[in-house]
Image (cartoon, rainbow, N blue to C red):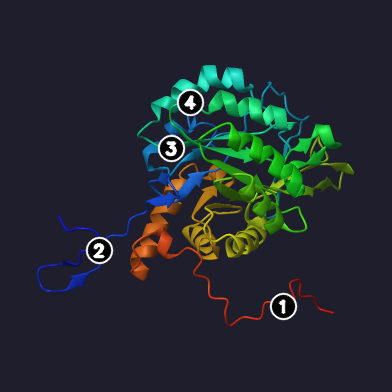
């Protein structure tokens, strides 16, 4: 068999480039493809296993786990928008004790099939720490995602990810408690996402997940009432992709050696490639799974086809290659006036 980078011929002397590899290495955290299933859209993969071959999914990020069980927000919890979806689930989950009892054996069974990243959420630094301790040793778990877009009840419900010092505090506490790599999941609902990202990396984050949903609202004009029981919720889907791509690019420019998982409105292989060009090392697919359970596999196959067409060896050959040198970068917020 030809080795890496070997040139193949068809017997007539016509040169064919080697088949590109989809494998990605996020500074020691490896995935067979750069397309993962995002938190909240795949759970642990148990239900999705009947619909998709999990061995062809790059990785699975679990639904966020909290210290204690949560019932979630009042209904209705979801509302379709013209270009995406609003949700206010409220981190409903069984809590970490039940999670270990029910899901740990399933996750261990995925060893050699697909890697699992456990998402953790909490109301305080102590809660994040306690959940970290309880999931850090689960077989099959290759990383932890710190969902820090949650209110800090100890500081007047300020969102951890909106304040560099609070983000640093929770990520630092988690990182000190485990050798499992921690990825900080950040929100774009901030003035300067680079500042928050840098704080997380200084605190010990192995990588970053960009971005979480954007805060939004929808109103039923017939009833004059909000479409969500919680009034506001997280906007996901195609509407947020340009914001997510911008955030990935800005953070990648500032932290080129830090692995970034790009998230936000990815439906096609071209969407995934756009994130990679912006500086992402891999991507997560969320809302698209609701209407196409095969989305992660389909998108990964499309990325491979794109790489082959461009004569590239793998996703790393795309990372950060957007050409901005000849473009005017100012003003940052162009307007009509």
Give the residue at mark 1. 330
> Does residue 207 appear left or right of residue 89 in this picture?
left
Give the residue at mark 4. 138
Circle 2 — which element? loop
Give the residue at mark 3. 115
Label disc, if present, on residue 285 of the rendered structure: none
Residue 289 visible in image: yes
- Residue 54, percent from left and from top: 41, 37
Give the residue at mark 2. 5
Q: How far apart are marks 2 and 4 (CA)?
A: 37 Å
Q: Distance between the residues labelled 3 and 1?
A: 41 Å
- Look at 35% across and 68% down and name the residue there: 309
- Residue 251, percent from left and from top: 62, 60
Quadrant assignment for the C terminus: bottom right
Q: Do the residues labelled 4 and 1 touch (CB within 8 Å)?
A: no
Using the image, determine if residue 251 lies above or below residue 168.
Answer: below
Q: Which of 263 and 134 is in front in this view?
A: 134
- As drawn, the residue found furthest toward the right would be 224
Quadrant assignment for the N terminus: bottom left
**Which label's residue is closer to the chain start, 2 or 4?**
2
- Residue 104, percent from left and from top: 49, 23
**Which label's residue is closer to the chain start, 3 or 1?**
3
**Which label's residue is closer to the chain start, 3 or 2?**
2
Q: How far apart are marks 3 and 4 (CA)?
A: 12 Å
Residue 295 visible in image: no
Q: Which of 248 and 309 is in front in this view?
A: 248
- The crowding category of the residue bearing disc 1, from other C-alpha atoms within 10 Å (few below 14, some 14 to 19, many at least 20), is few
- Look at 67% across and 24% down and name the residue there: 67
Name the quadrant containing residue 315: bottom left
């Amino acid at each position: 068999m030809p080795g890496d980078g070997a040139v193949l011929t068809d017997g007539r002397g016509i040169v064919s480039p080697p088949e590109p590899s989809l494998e990605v290495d996020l500074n020691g955290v490896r995935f067979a493809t750069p397309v993962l299933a995002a938190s909240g859209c795949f759970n642990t993969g148990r239900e999705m296993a009947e619909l998709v071959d999990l061995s062809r999914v790059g990785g699975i990020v679990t639904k966020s786990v909290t210290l204690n069980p949560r019932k979630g927000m009042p209904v209705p919890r979801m509302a379709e928008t013209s270009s995406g979806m609003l949700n206010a689930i409220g981190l409903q989950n069984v809590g970490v004790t039940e999670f270990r009892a029910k899901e740990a054996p399933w996750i261990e069974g995925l060893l050699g099939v697909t890697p699992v990243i456990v998402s953790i959420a909490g109301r305080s630094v102590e809660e994040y720490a306690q959940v970290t301790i309880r999931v850090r040793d689960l077989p099959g778990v290759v990383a932890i995602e710190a969902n820090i877009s949650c209110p800090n009840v100890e500081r007047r419900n300020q969102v951890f990810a909106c304040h560099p010092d609070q983000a640093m505090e929770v990520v630092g506490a988690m990182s000190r408690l485990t050798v499992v790599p921690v990825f900080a999941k950040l929100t774009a609902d901030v003035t300067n996402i680079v500042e928050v990202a840098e704080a997380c990396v200084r605190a010990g984050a192995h990588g970053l997940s960009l971005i979480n949903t954007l805060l939004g609202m929808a109103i039923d004009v017939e009833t004059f009432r909000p479409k969500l029981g919680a009034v506001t919720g997280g906007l996901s889907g195609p509407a947020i992709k340009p914001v997510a791509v911008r955030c990935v690019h800005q953070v990648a420019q500032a932290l080129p050696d830090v692995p970034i998982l790009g998230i936000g409105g990815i439906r096609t292989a071209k969407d995934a490639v756009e994130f990679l060009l912006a500086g992402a090392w891999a991507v997560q697919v969320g809302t698209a799974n609701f209407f196409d359970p095969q989305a992660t596999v389909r998108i990964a196959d499309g990325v491979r086809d794109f790489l082959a067409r461009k004569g590239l060896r793998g996703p790393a050959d795309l990372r950060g290659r957007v050409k901005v040198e000849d473009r005017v970068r100012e003003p940052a917020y162009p307007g009509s006036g």
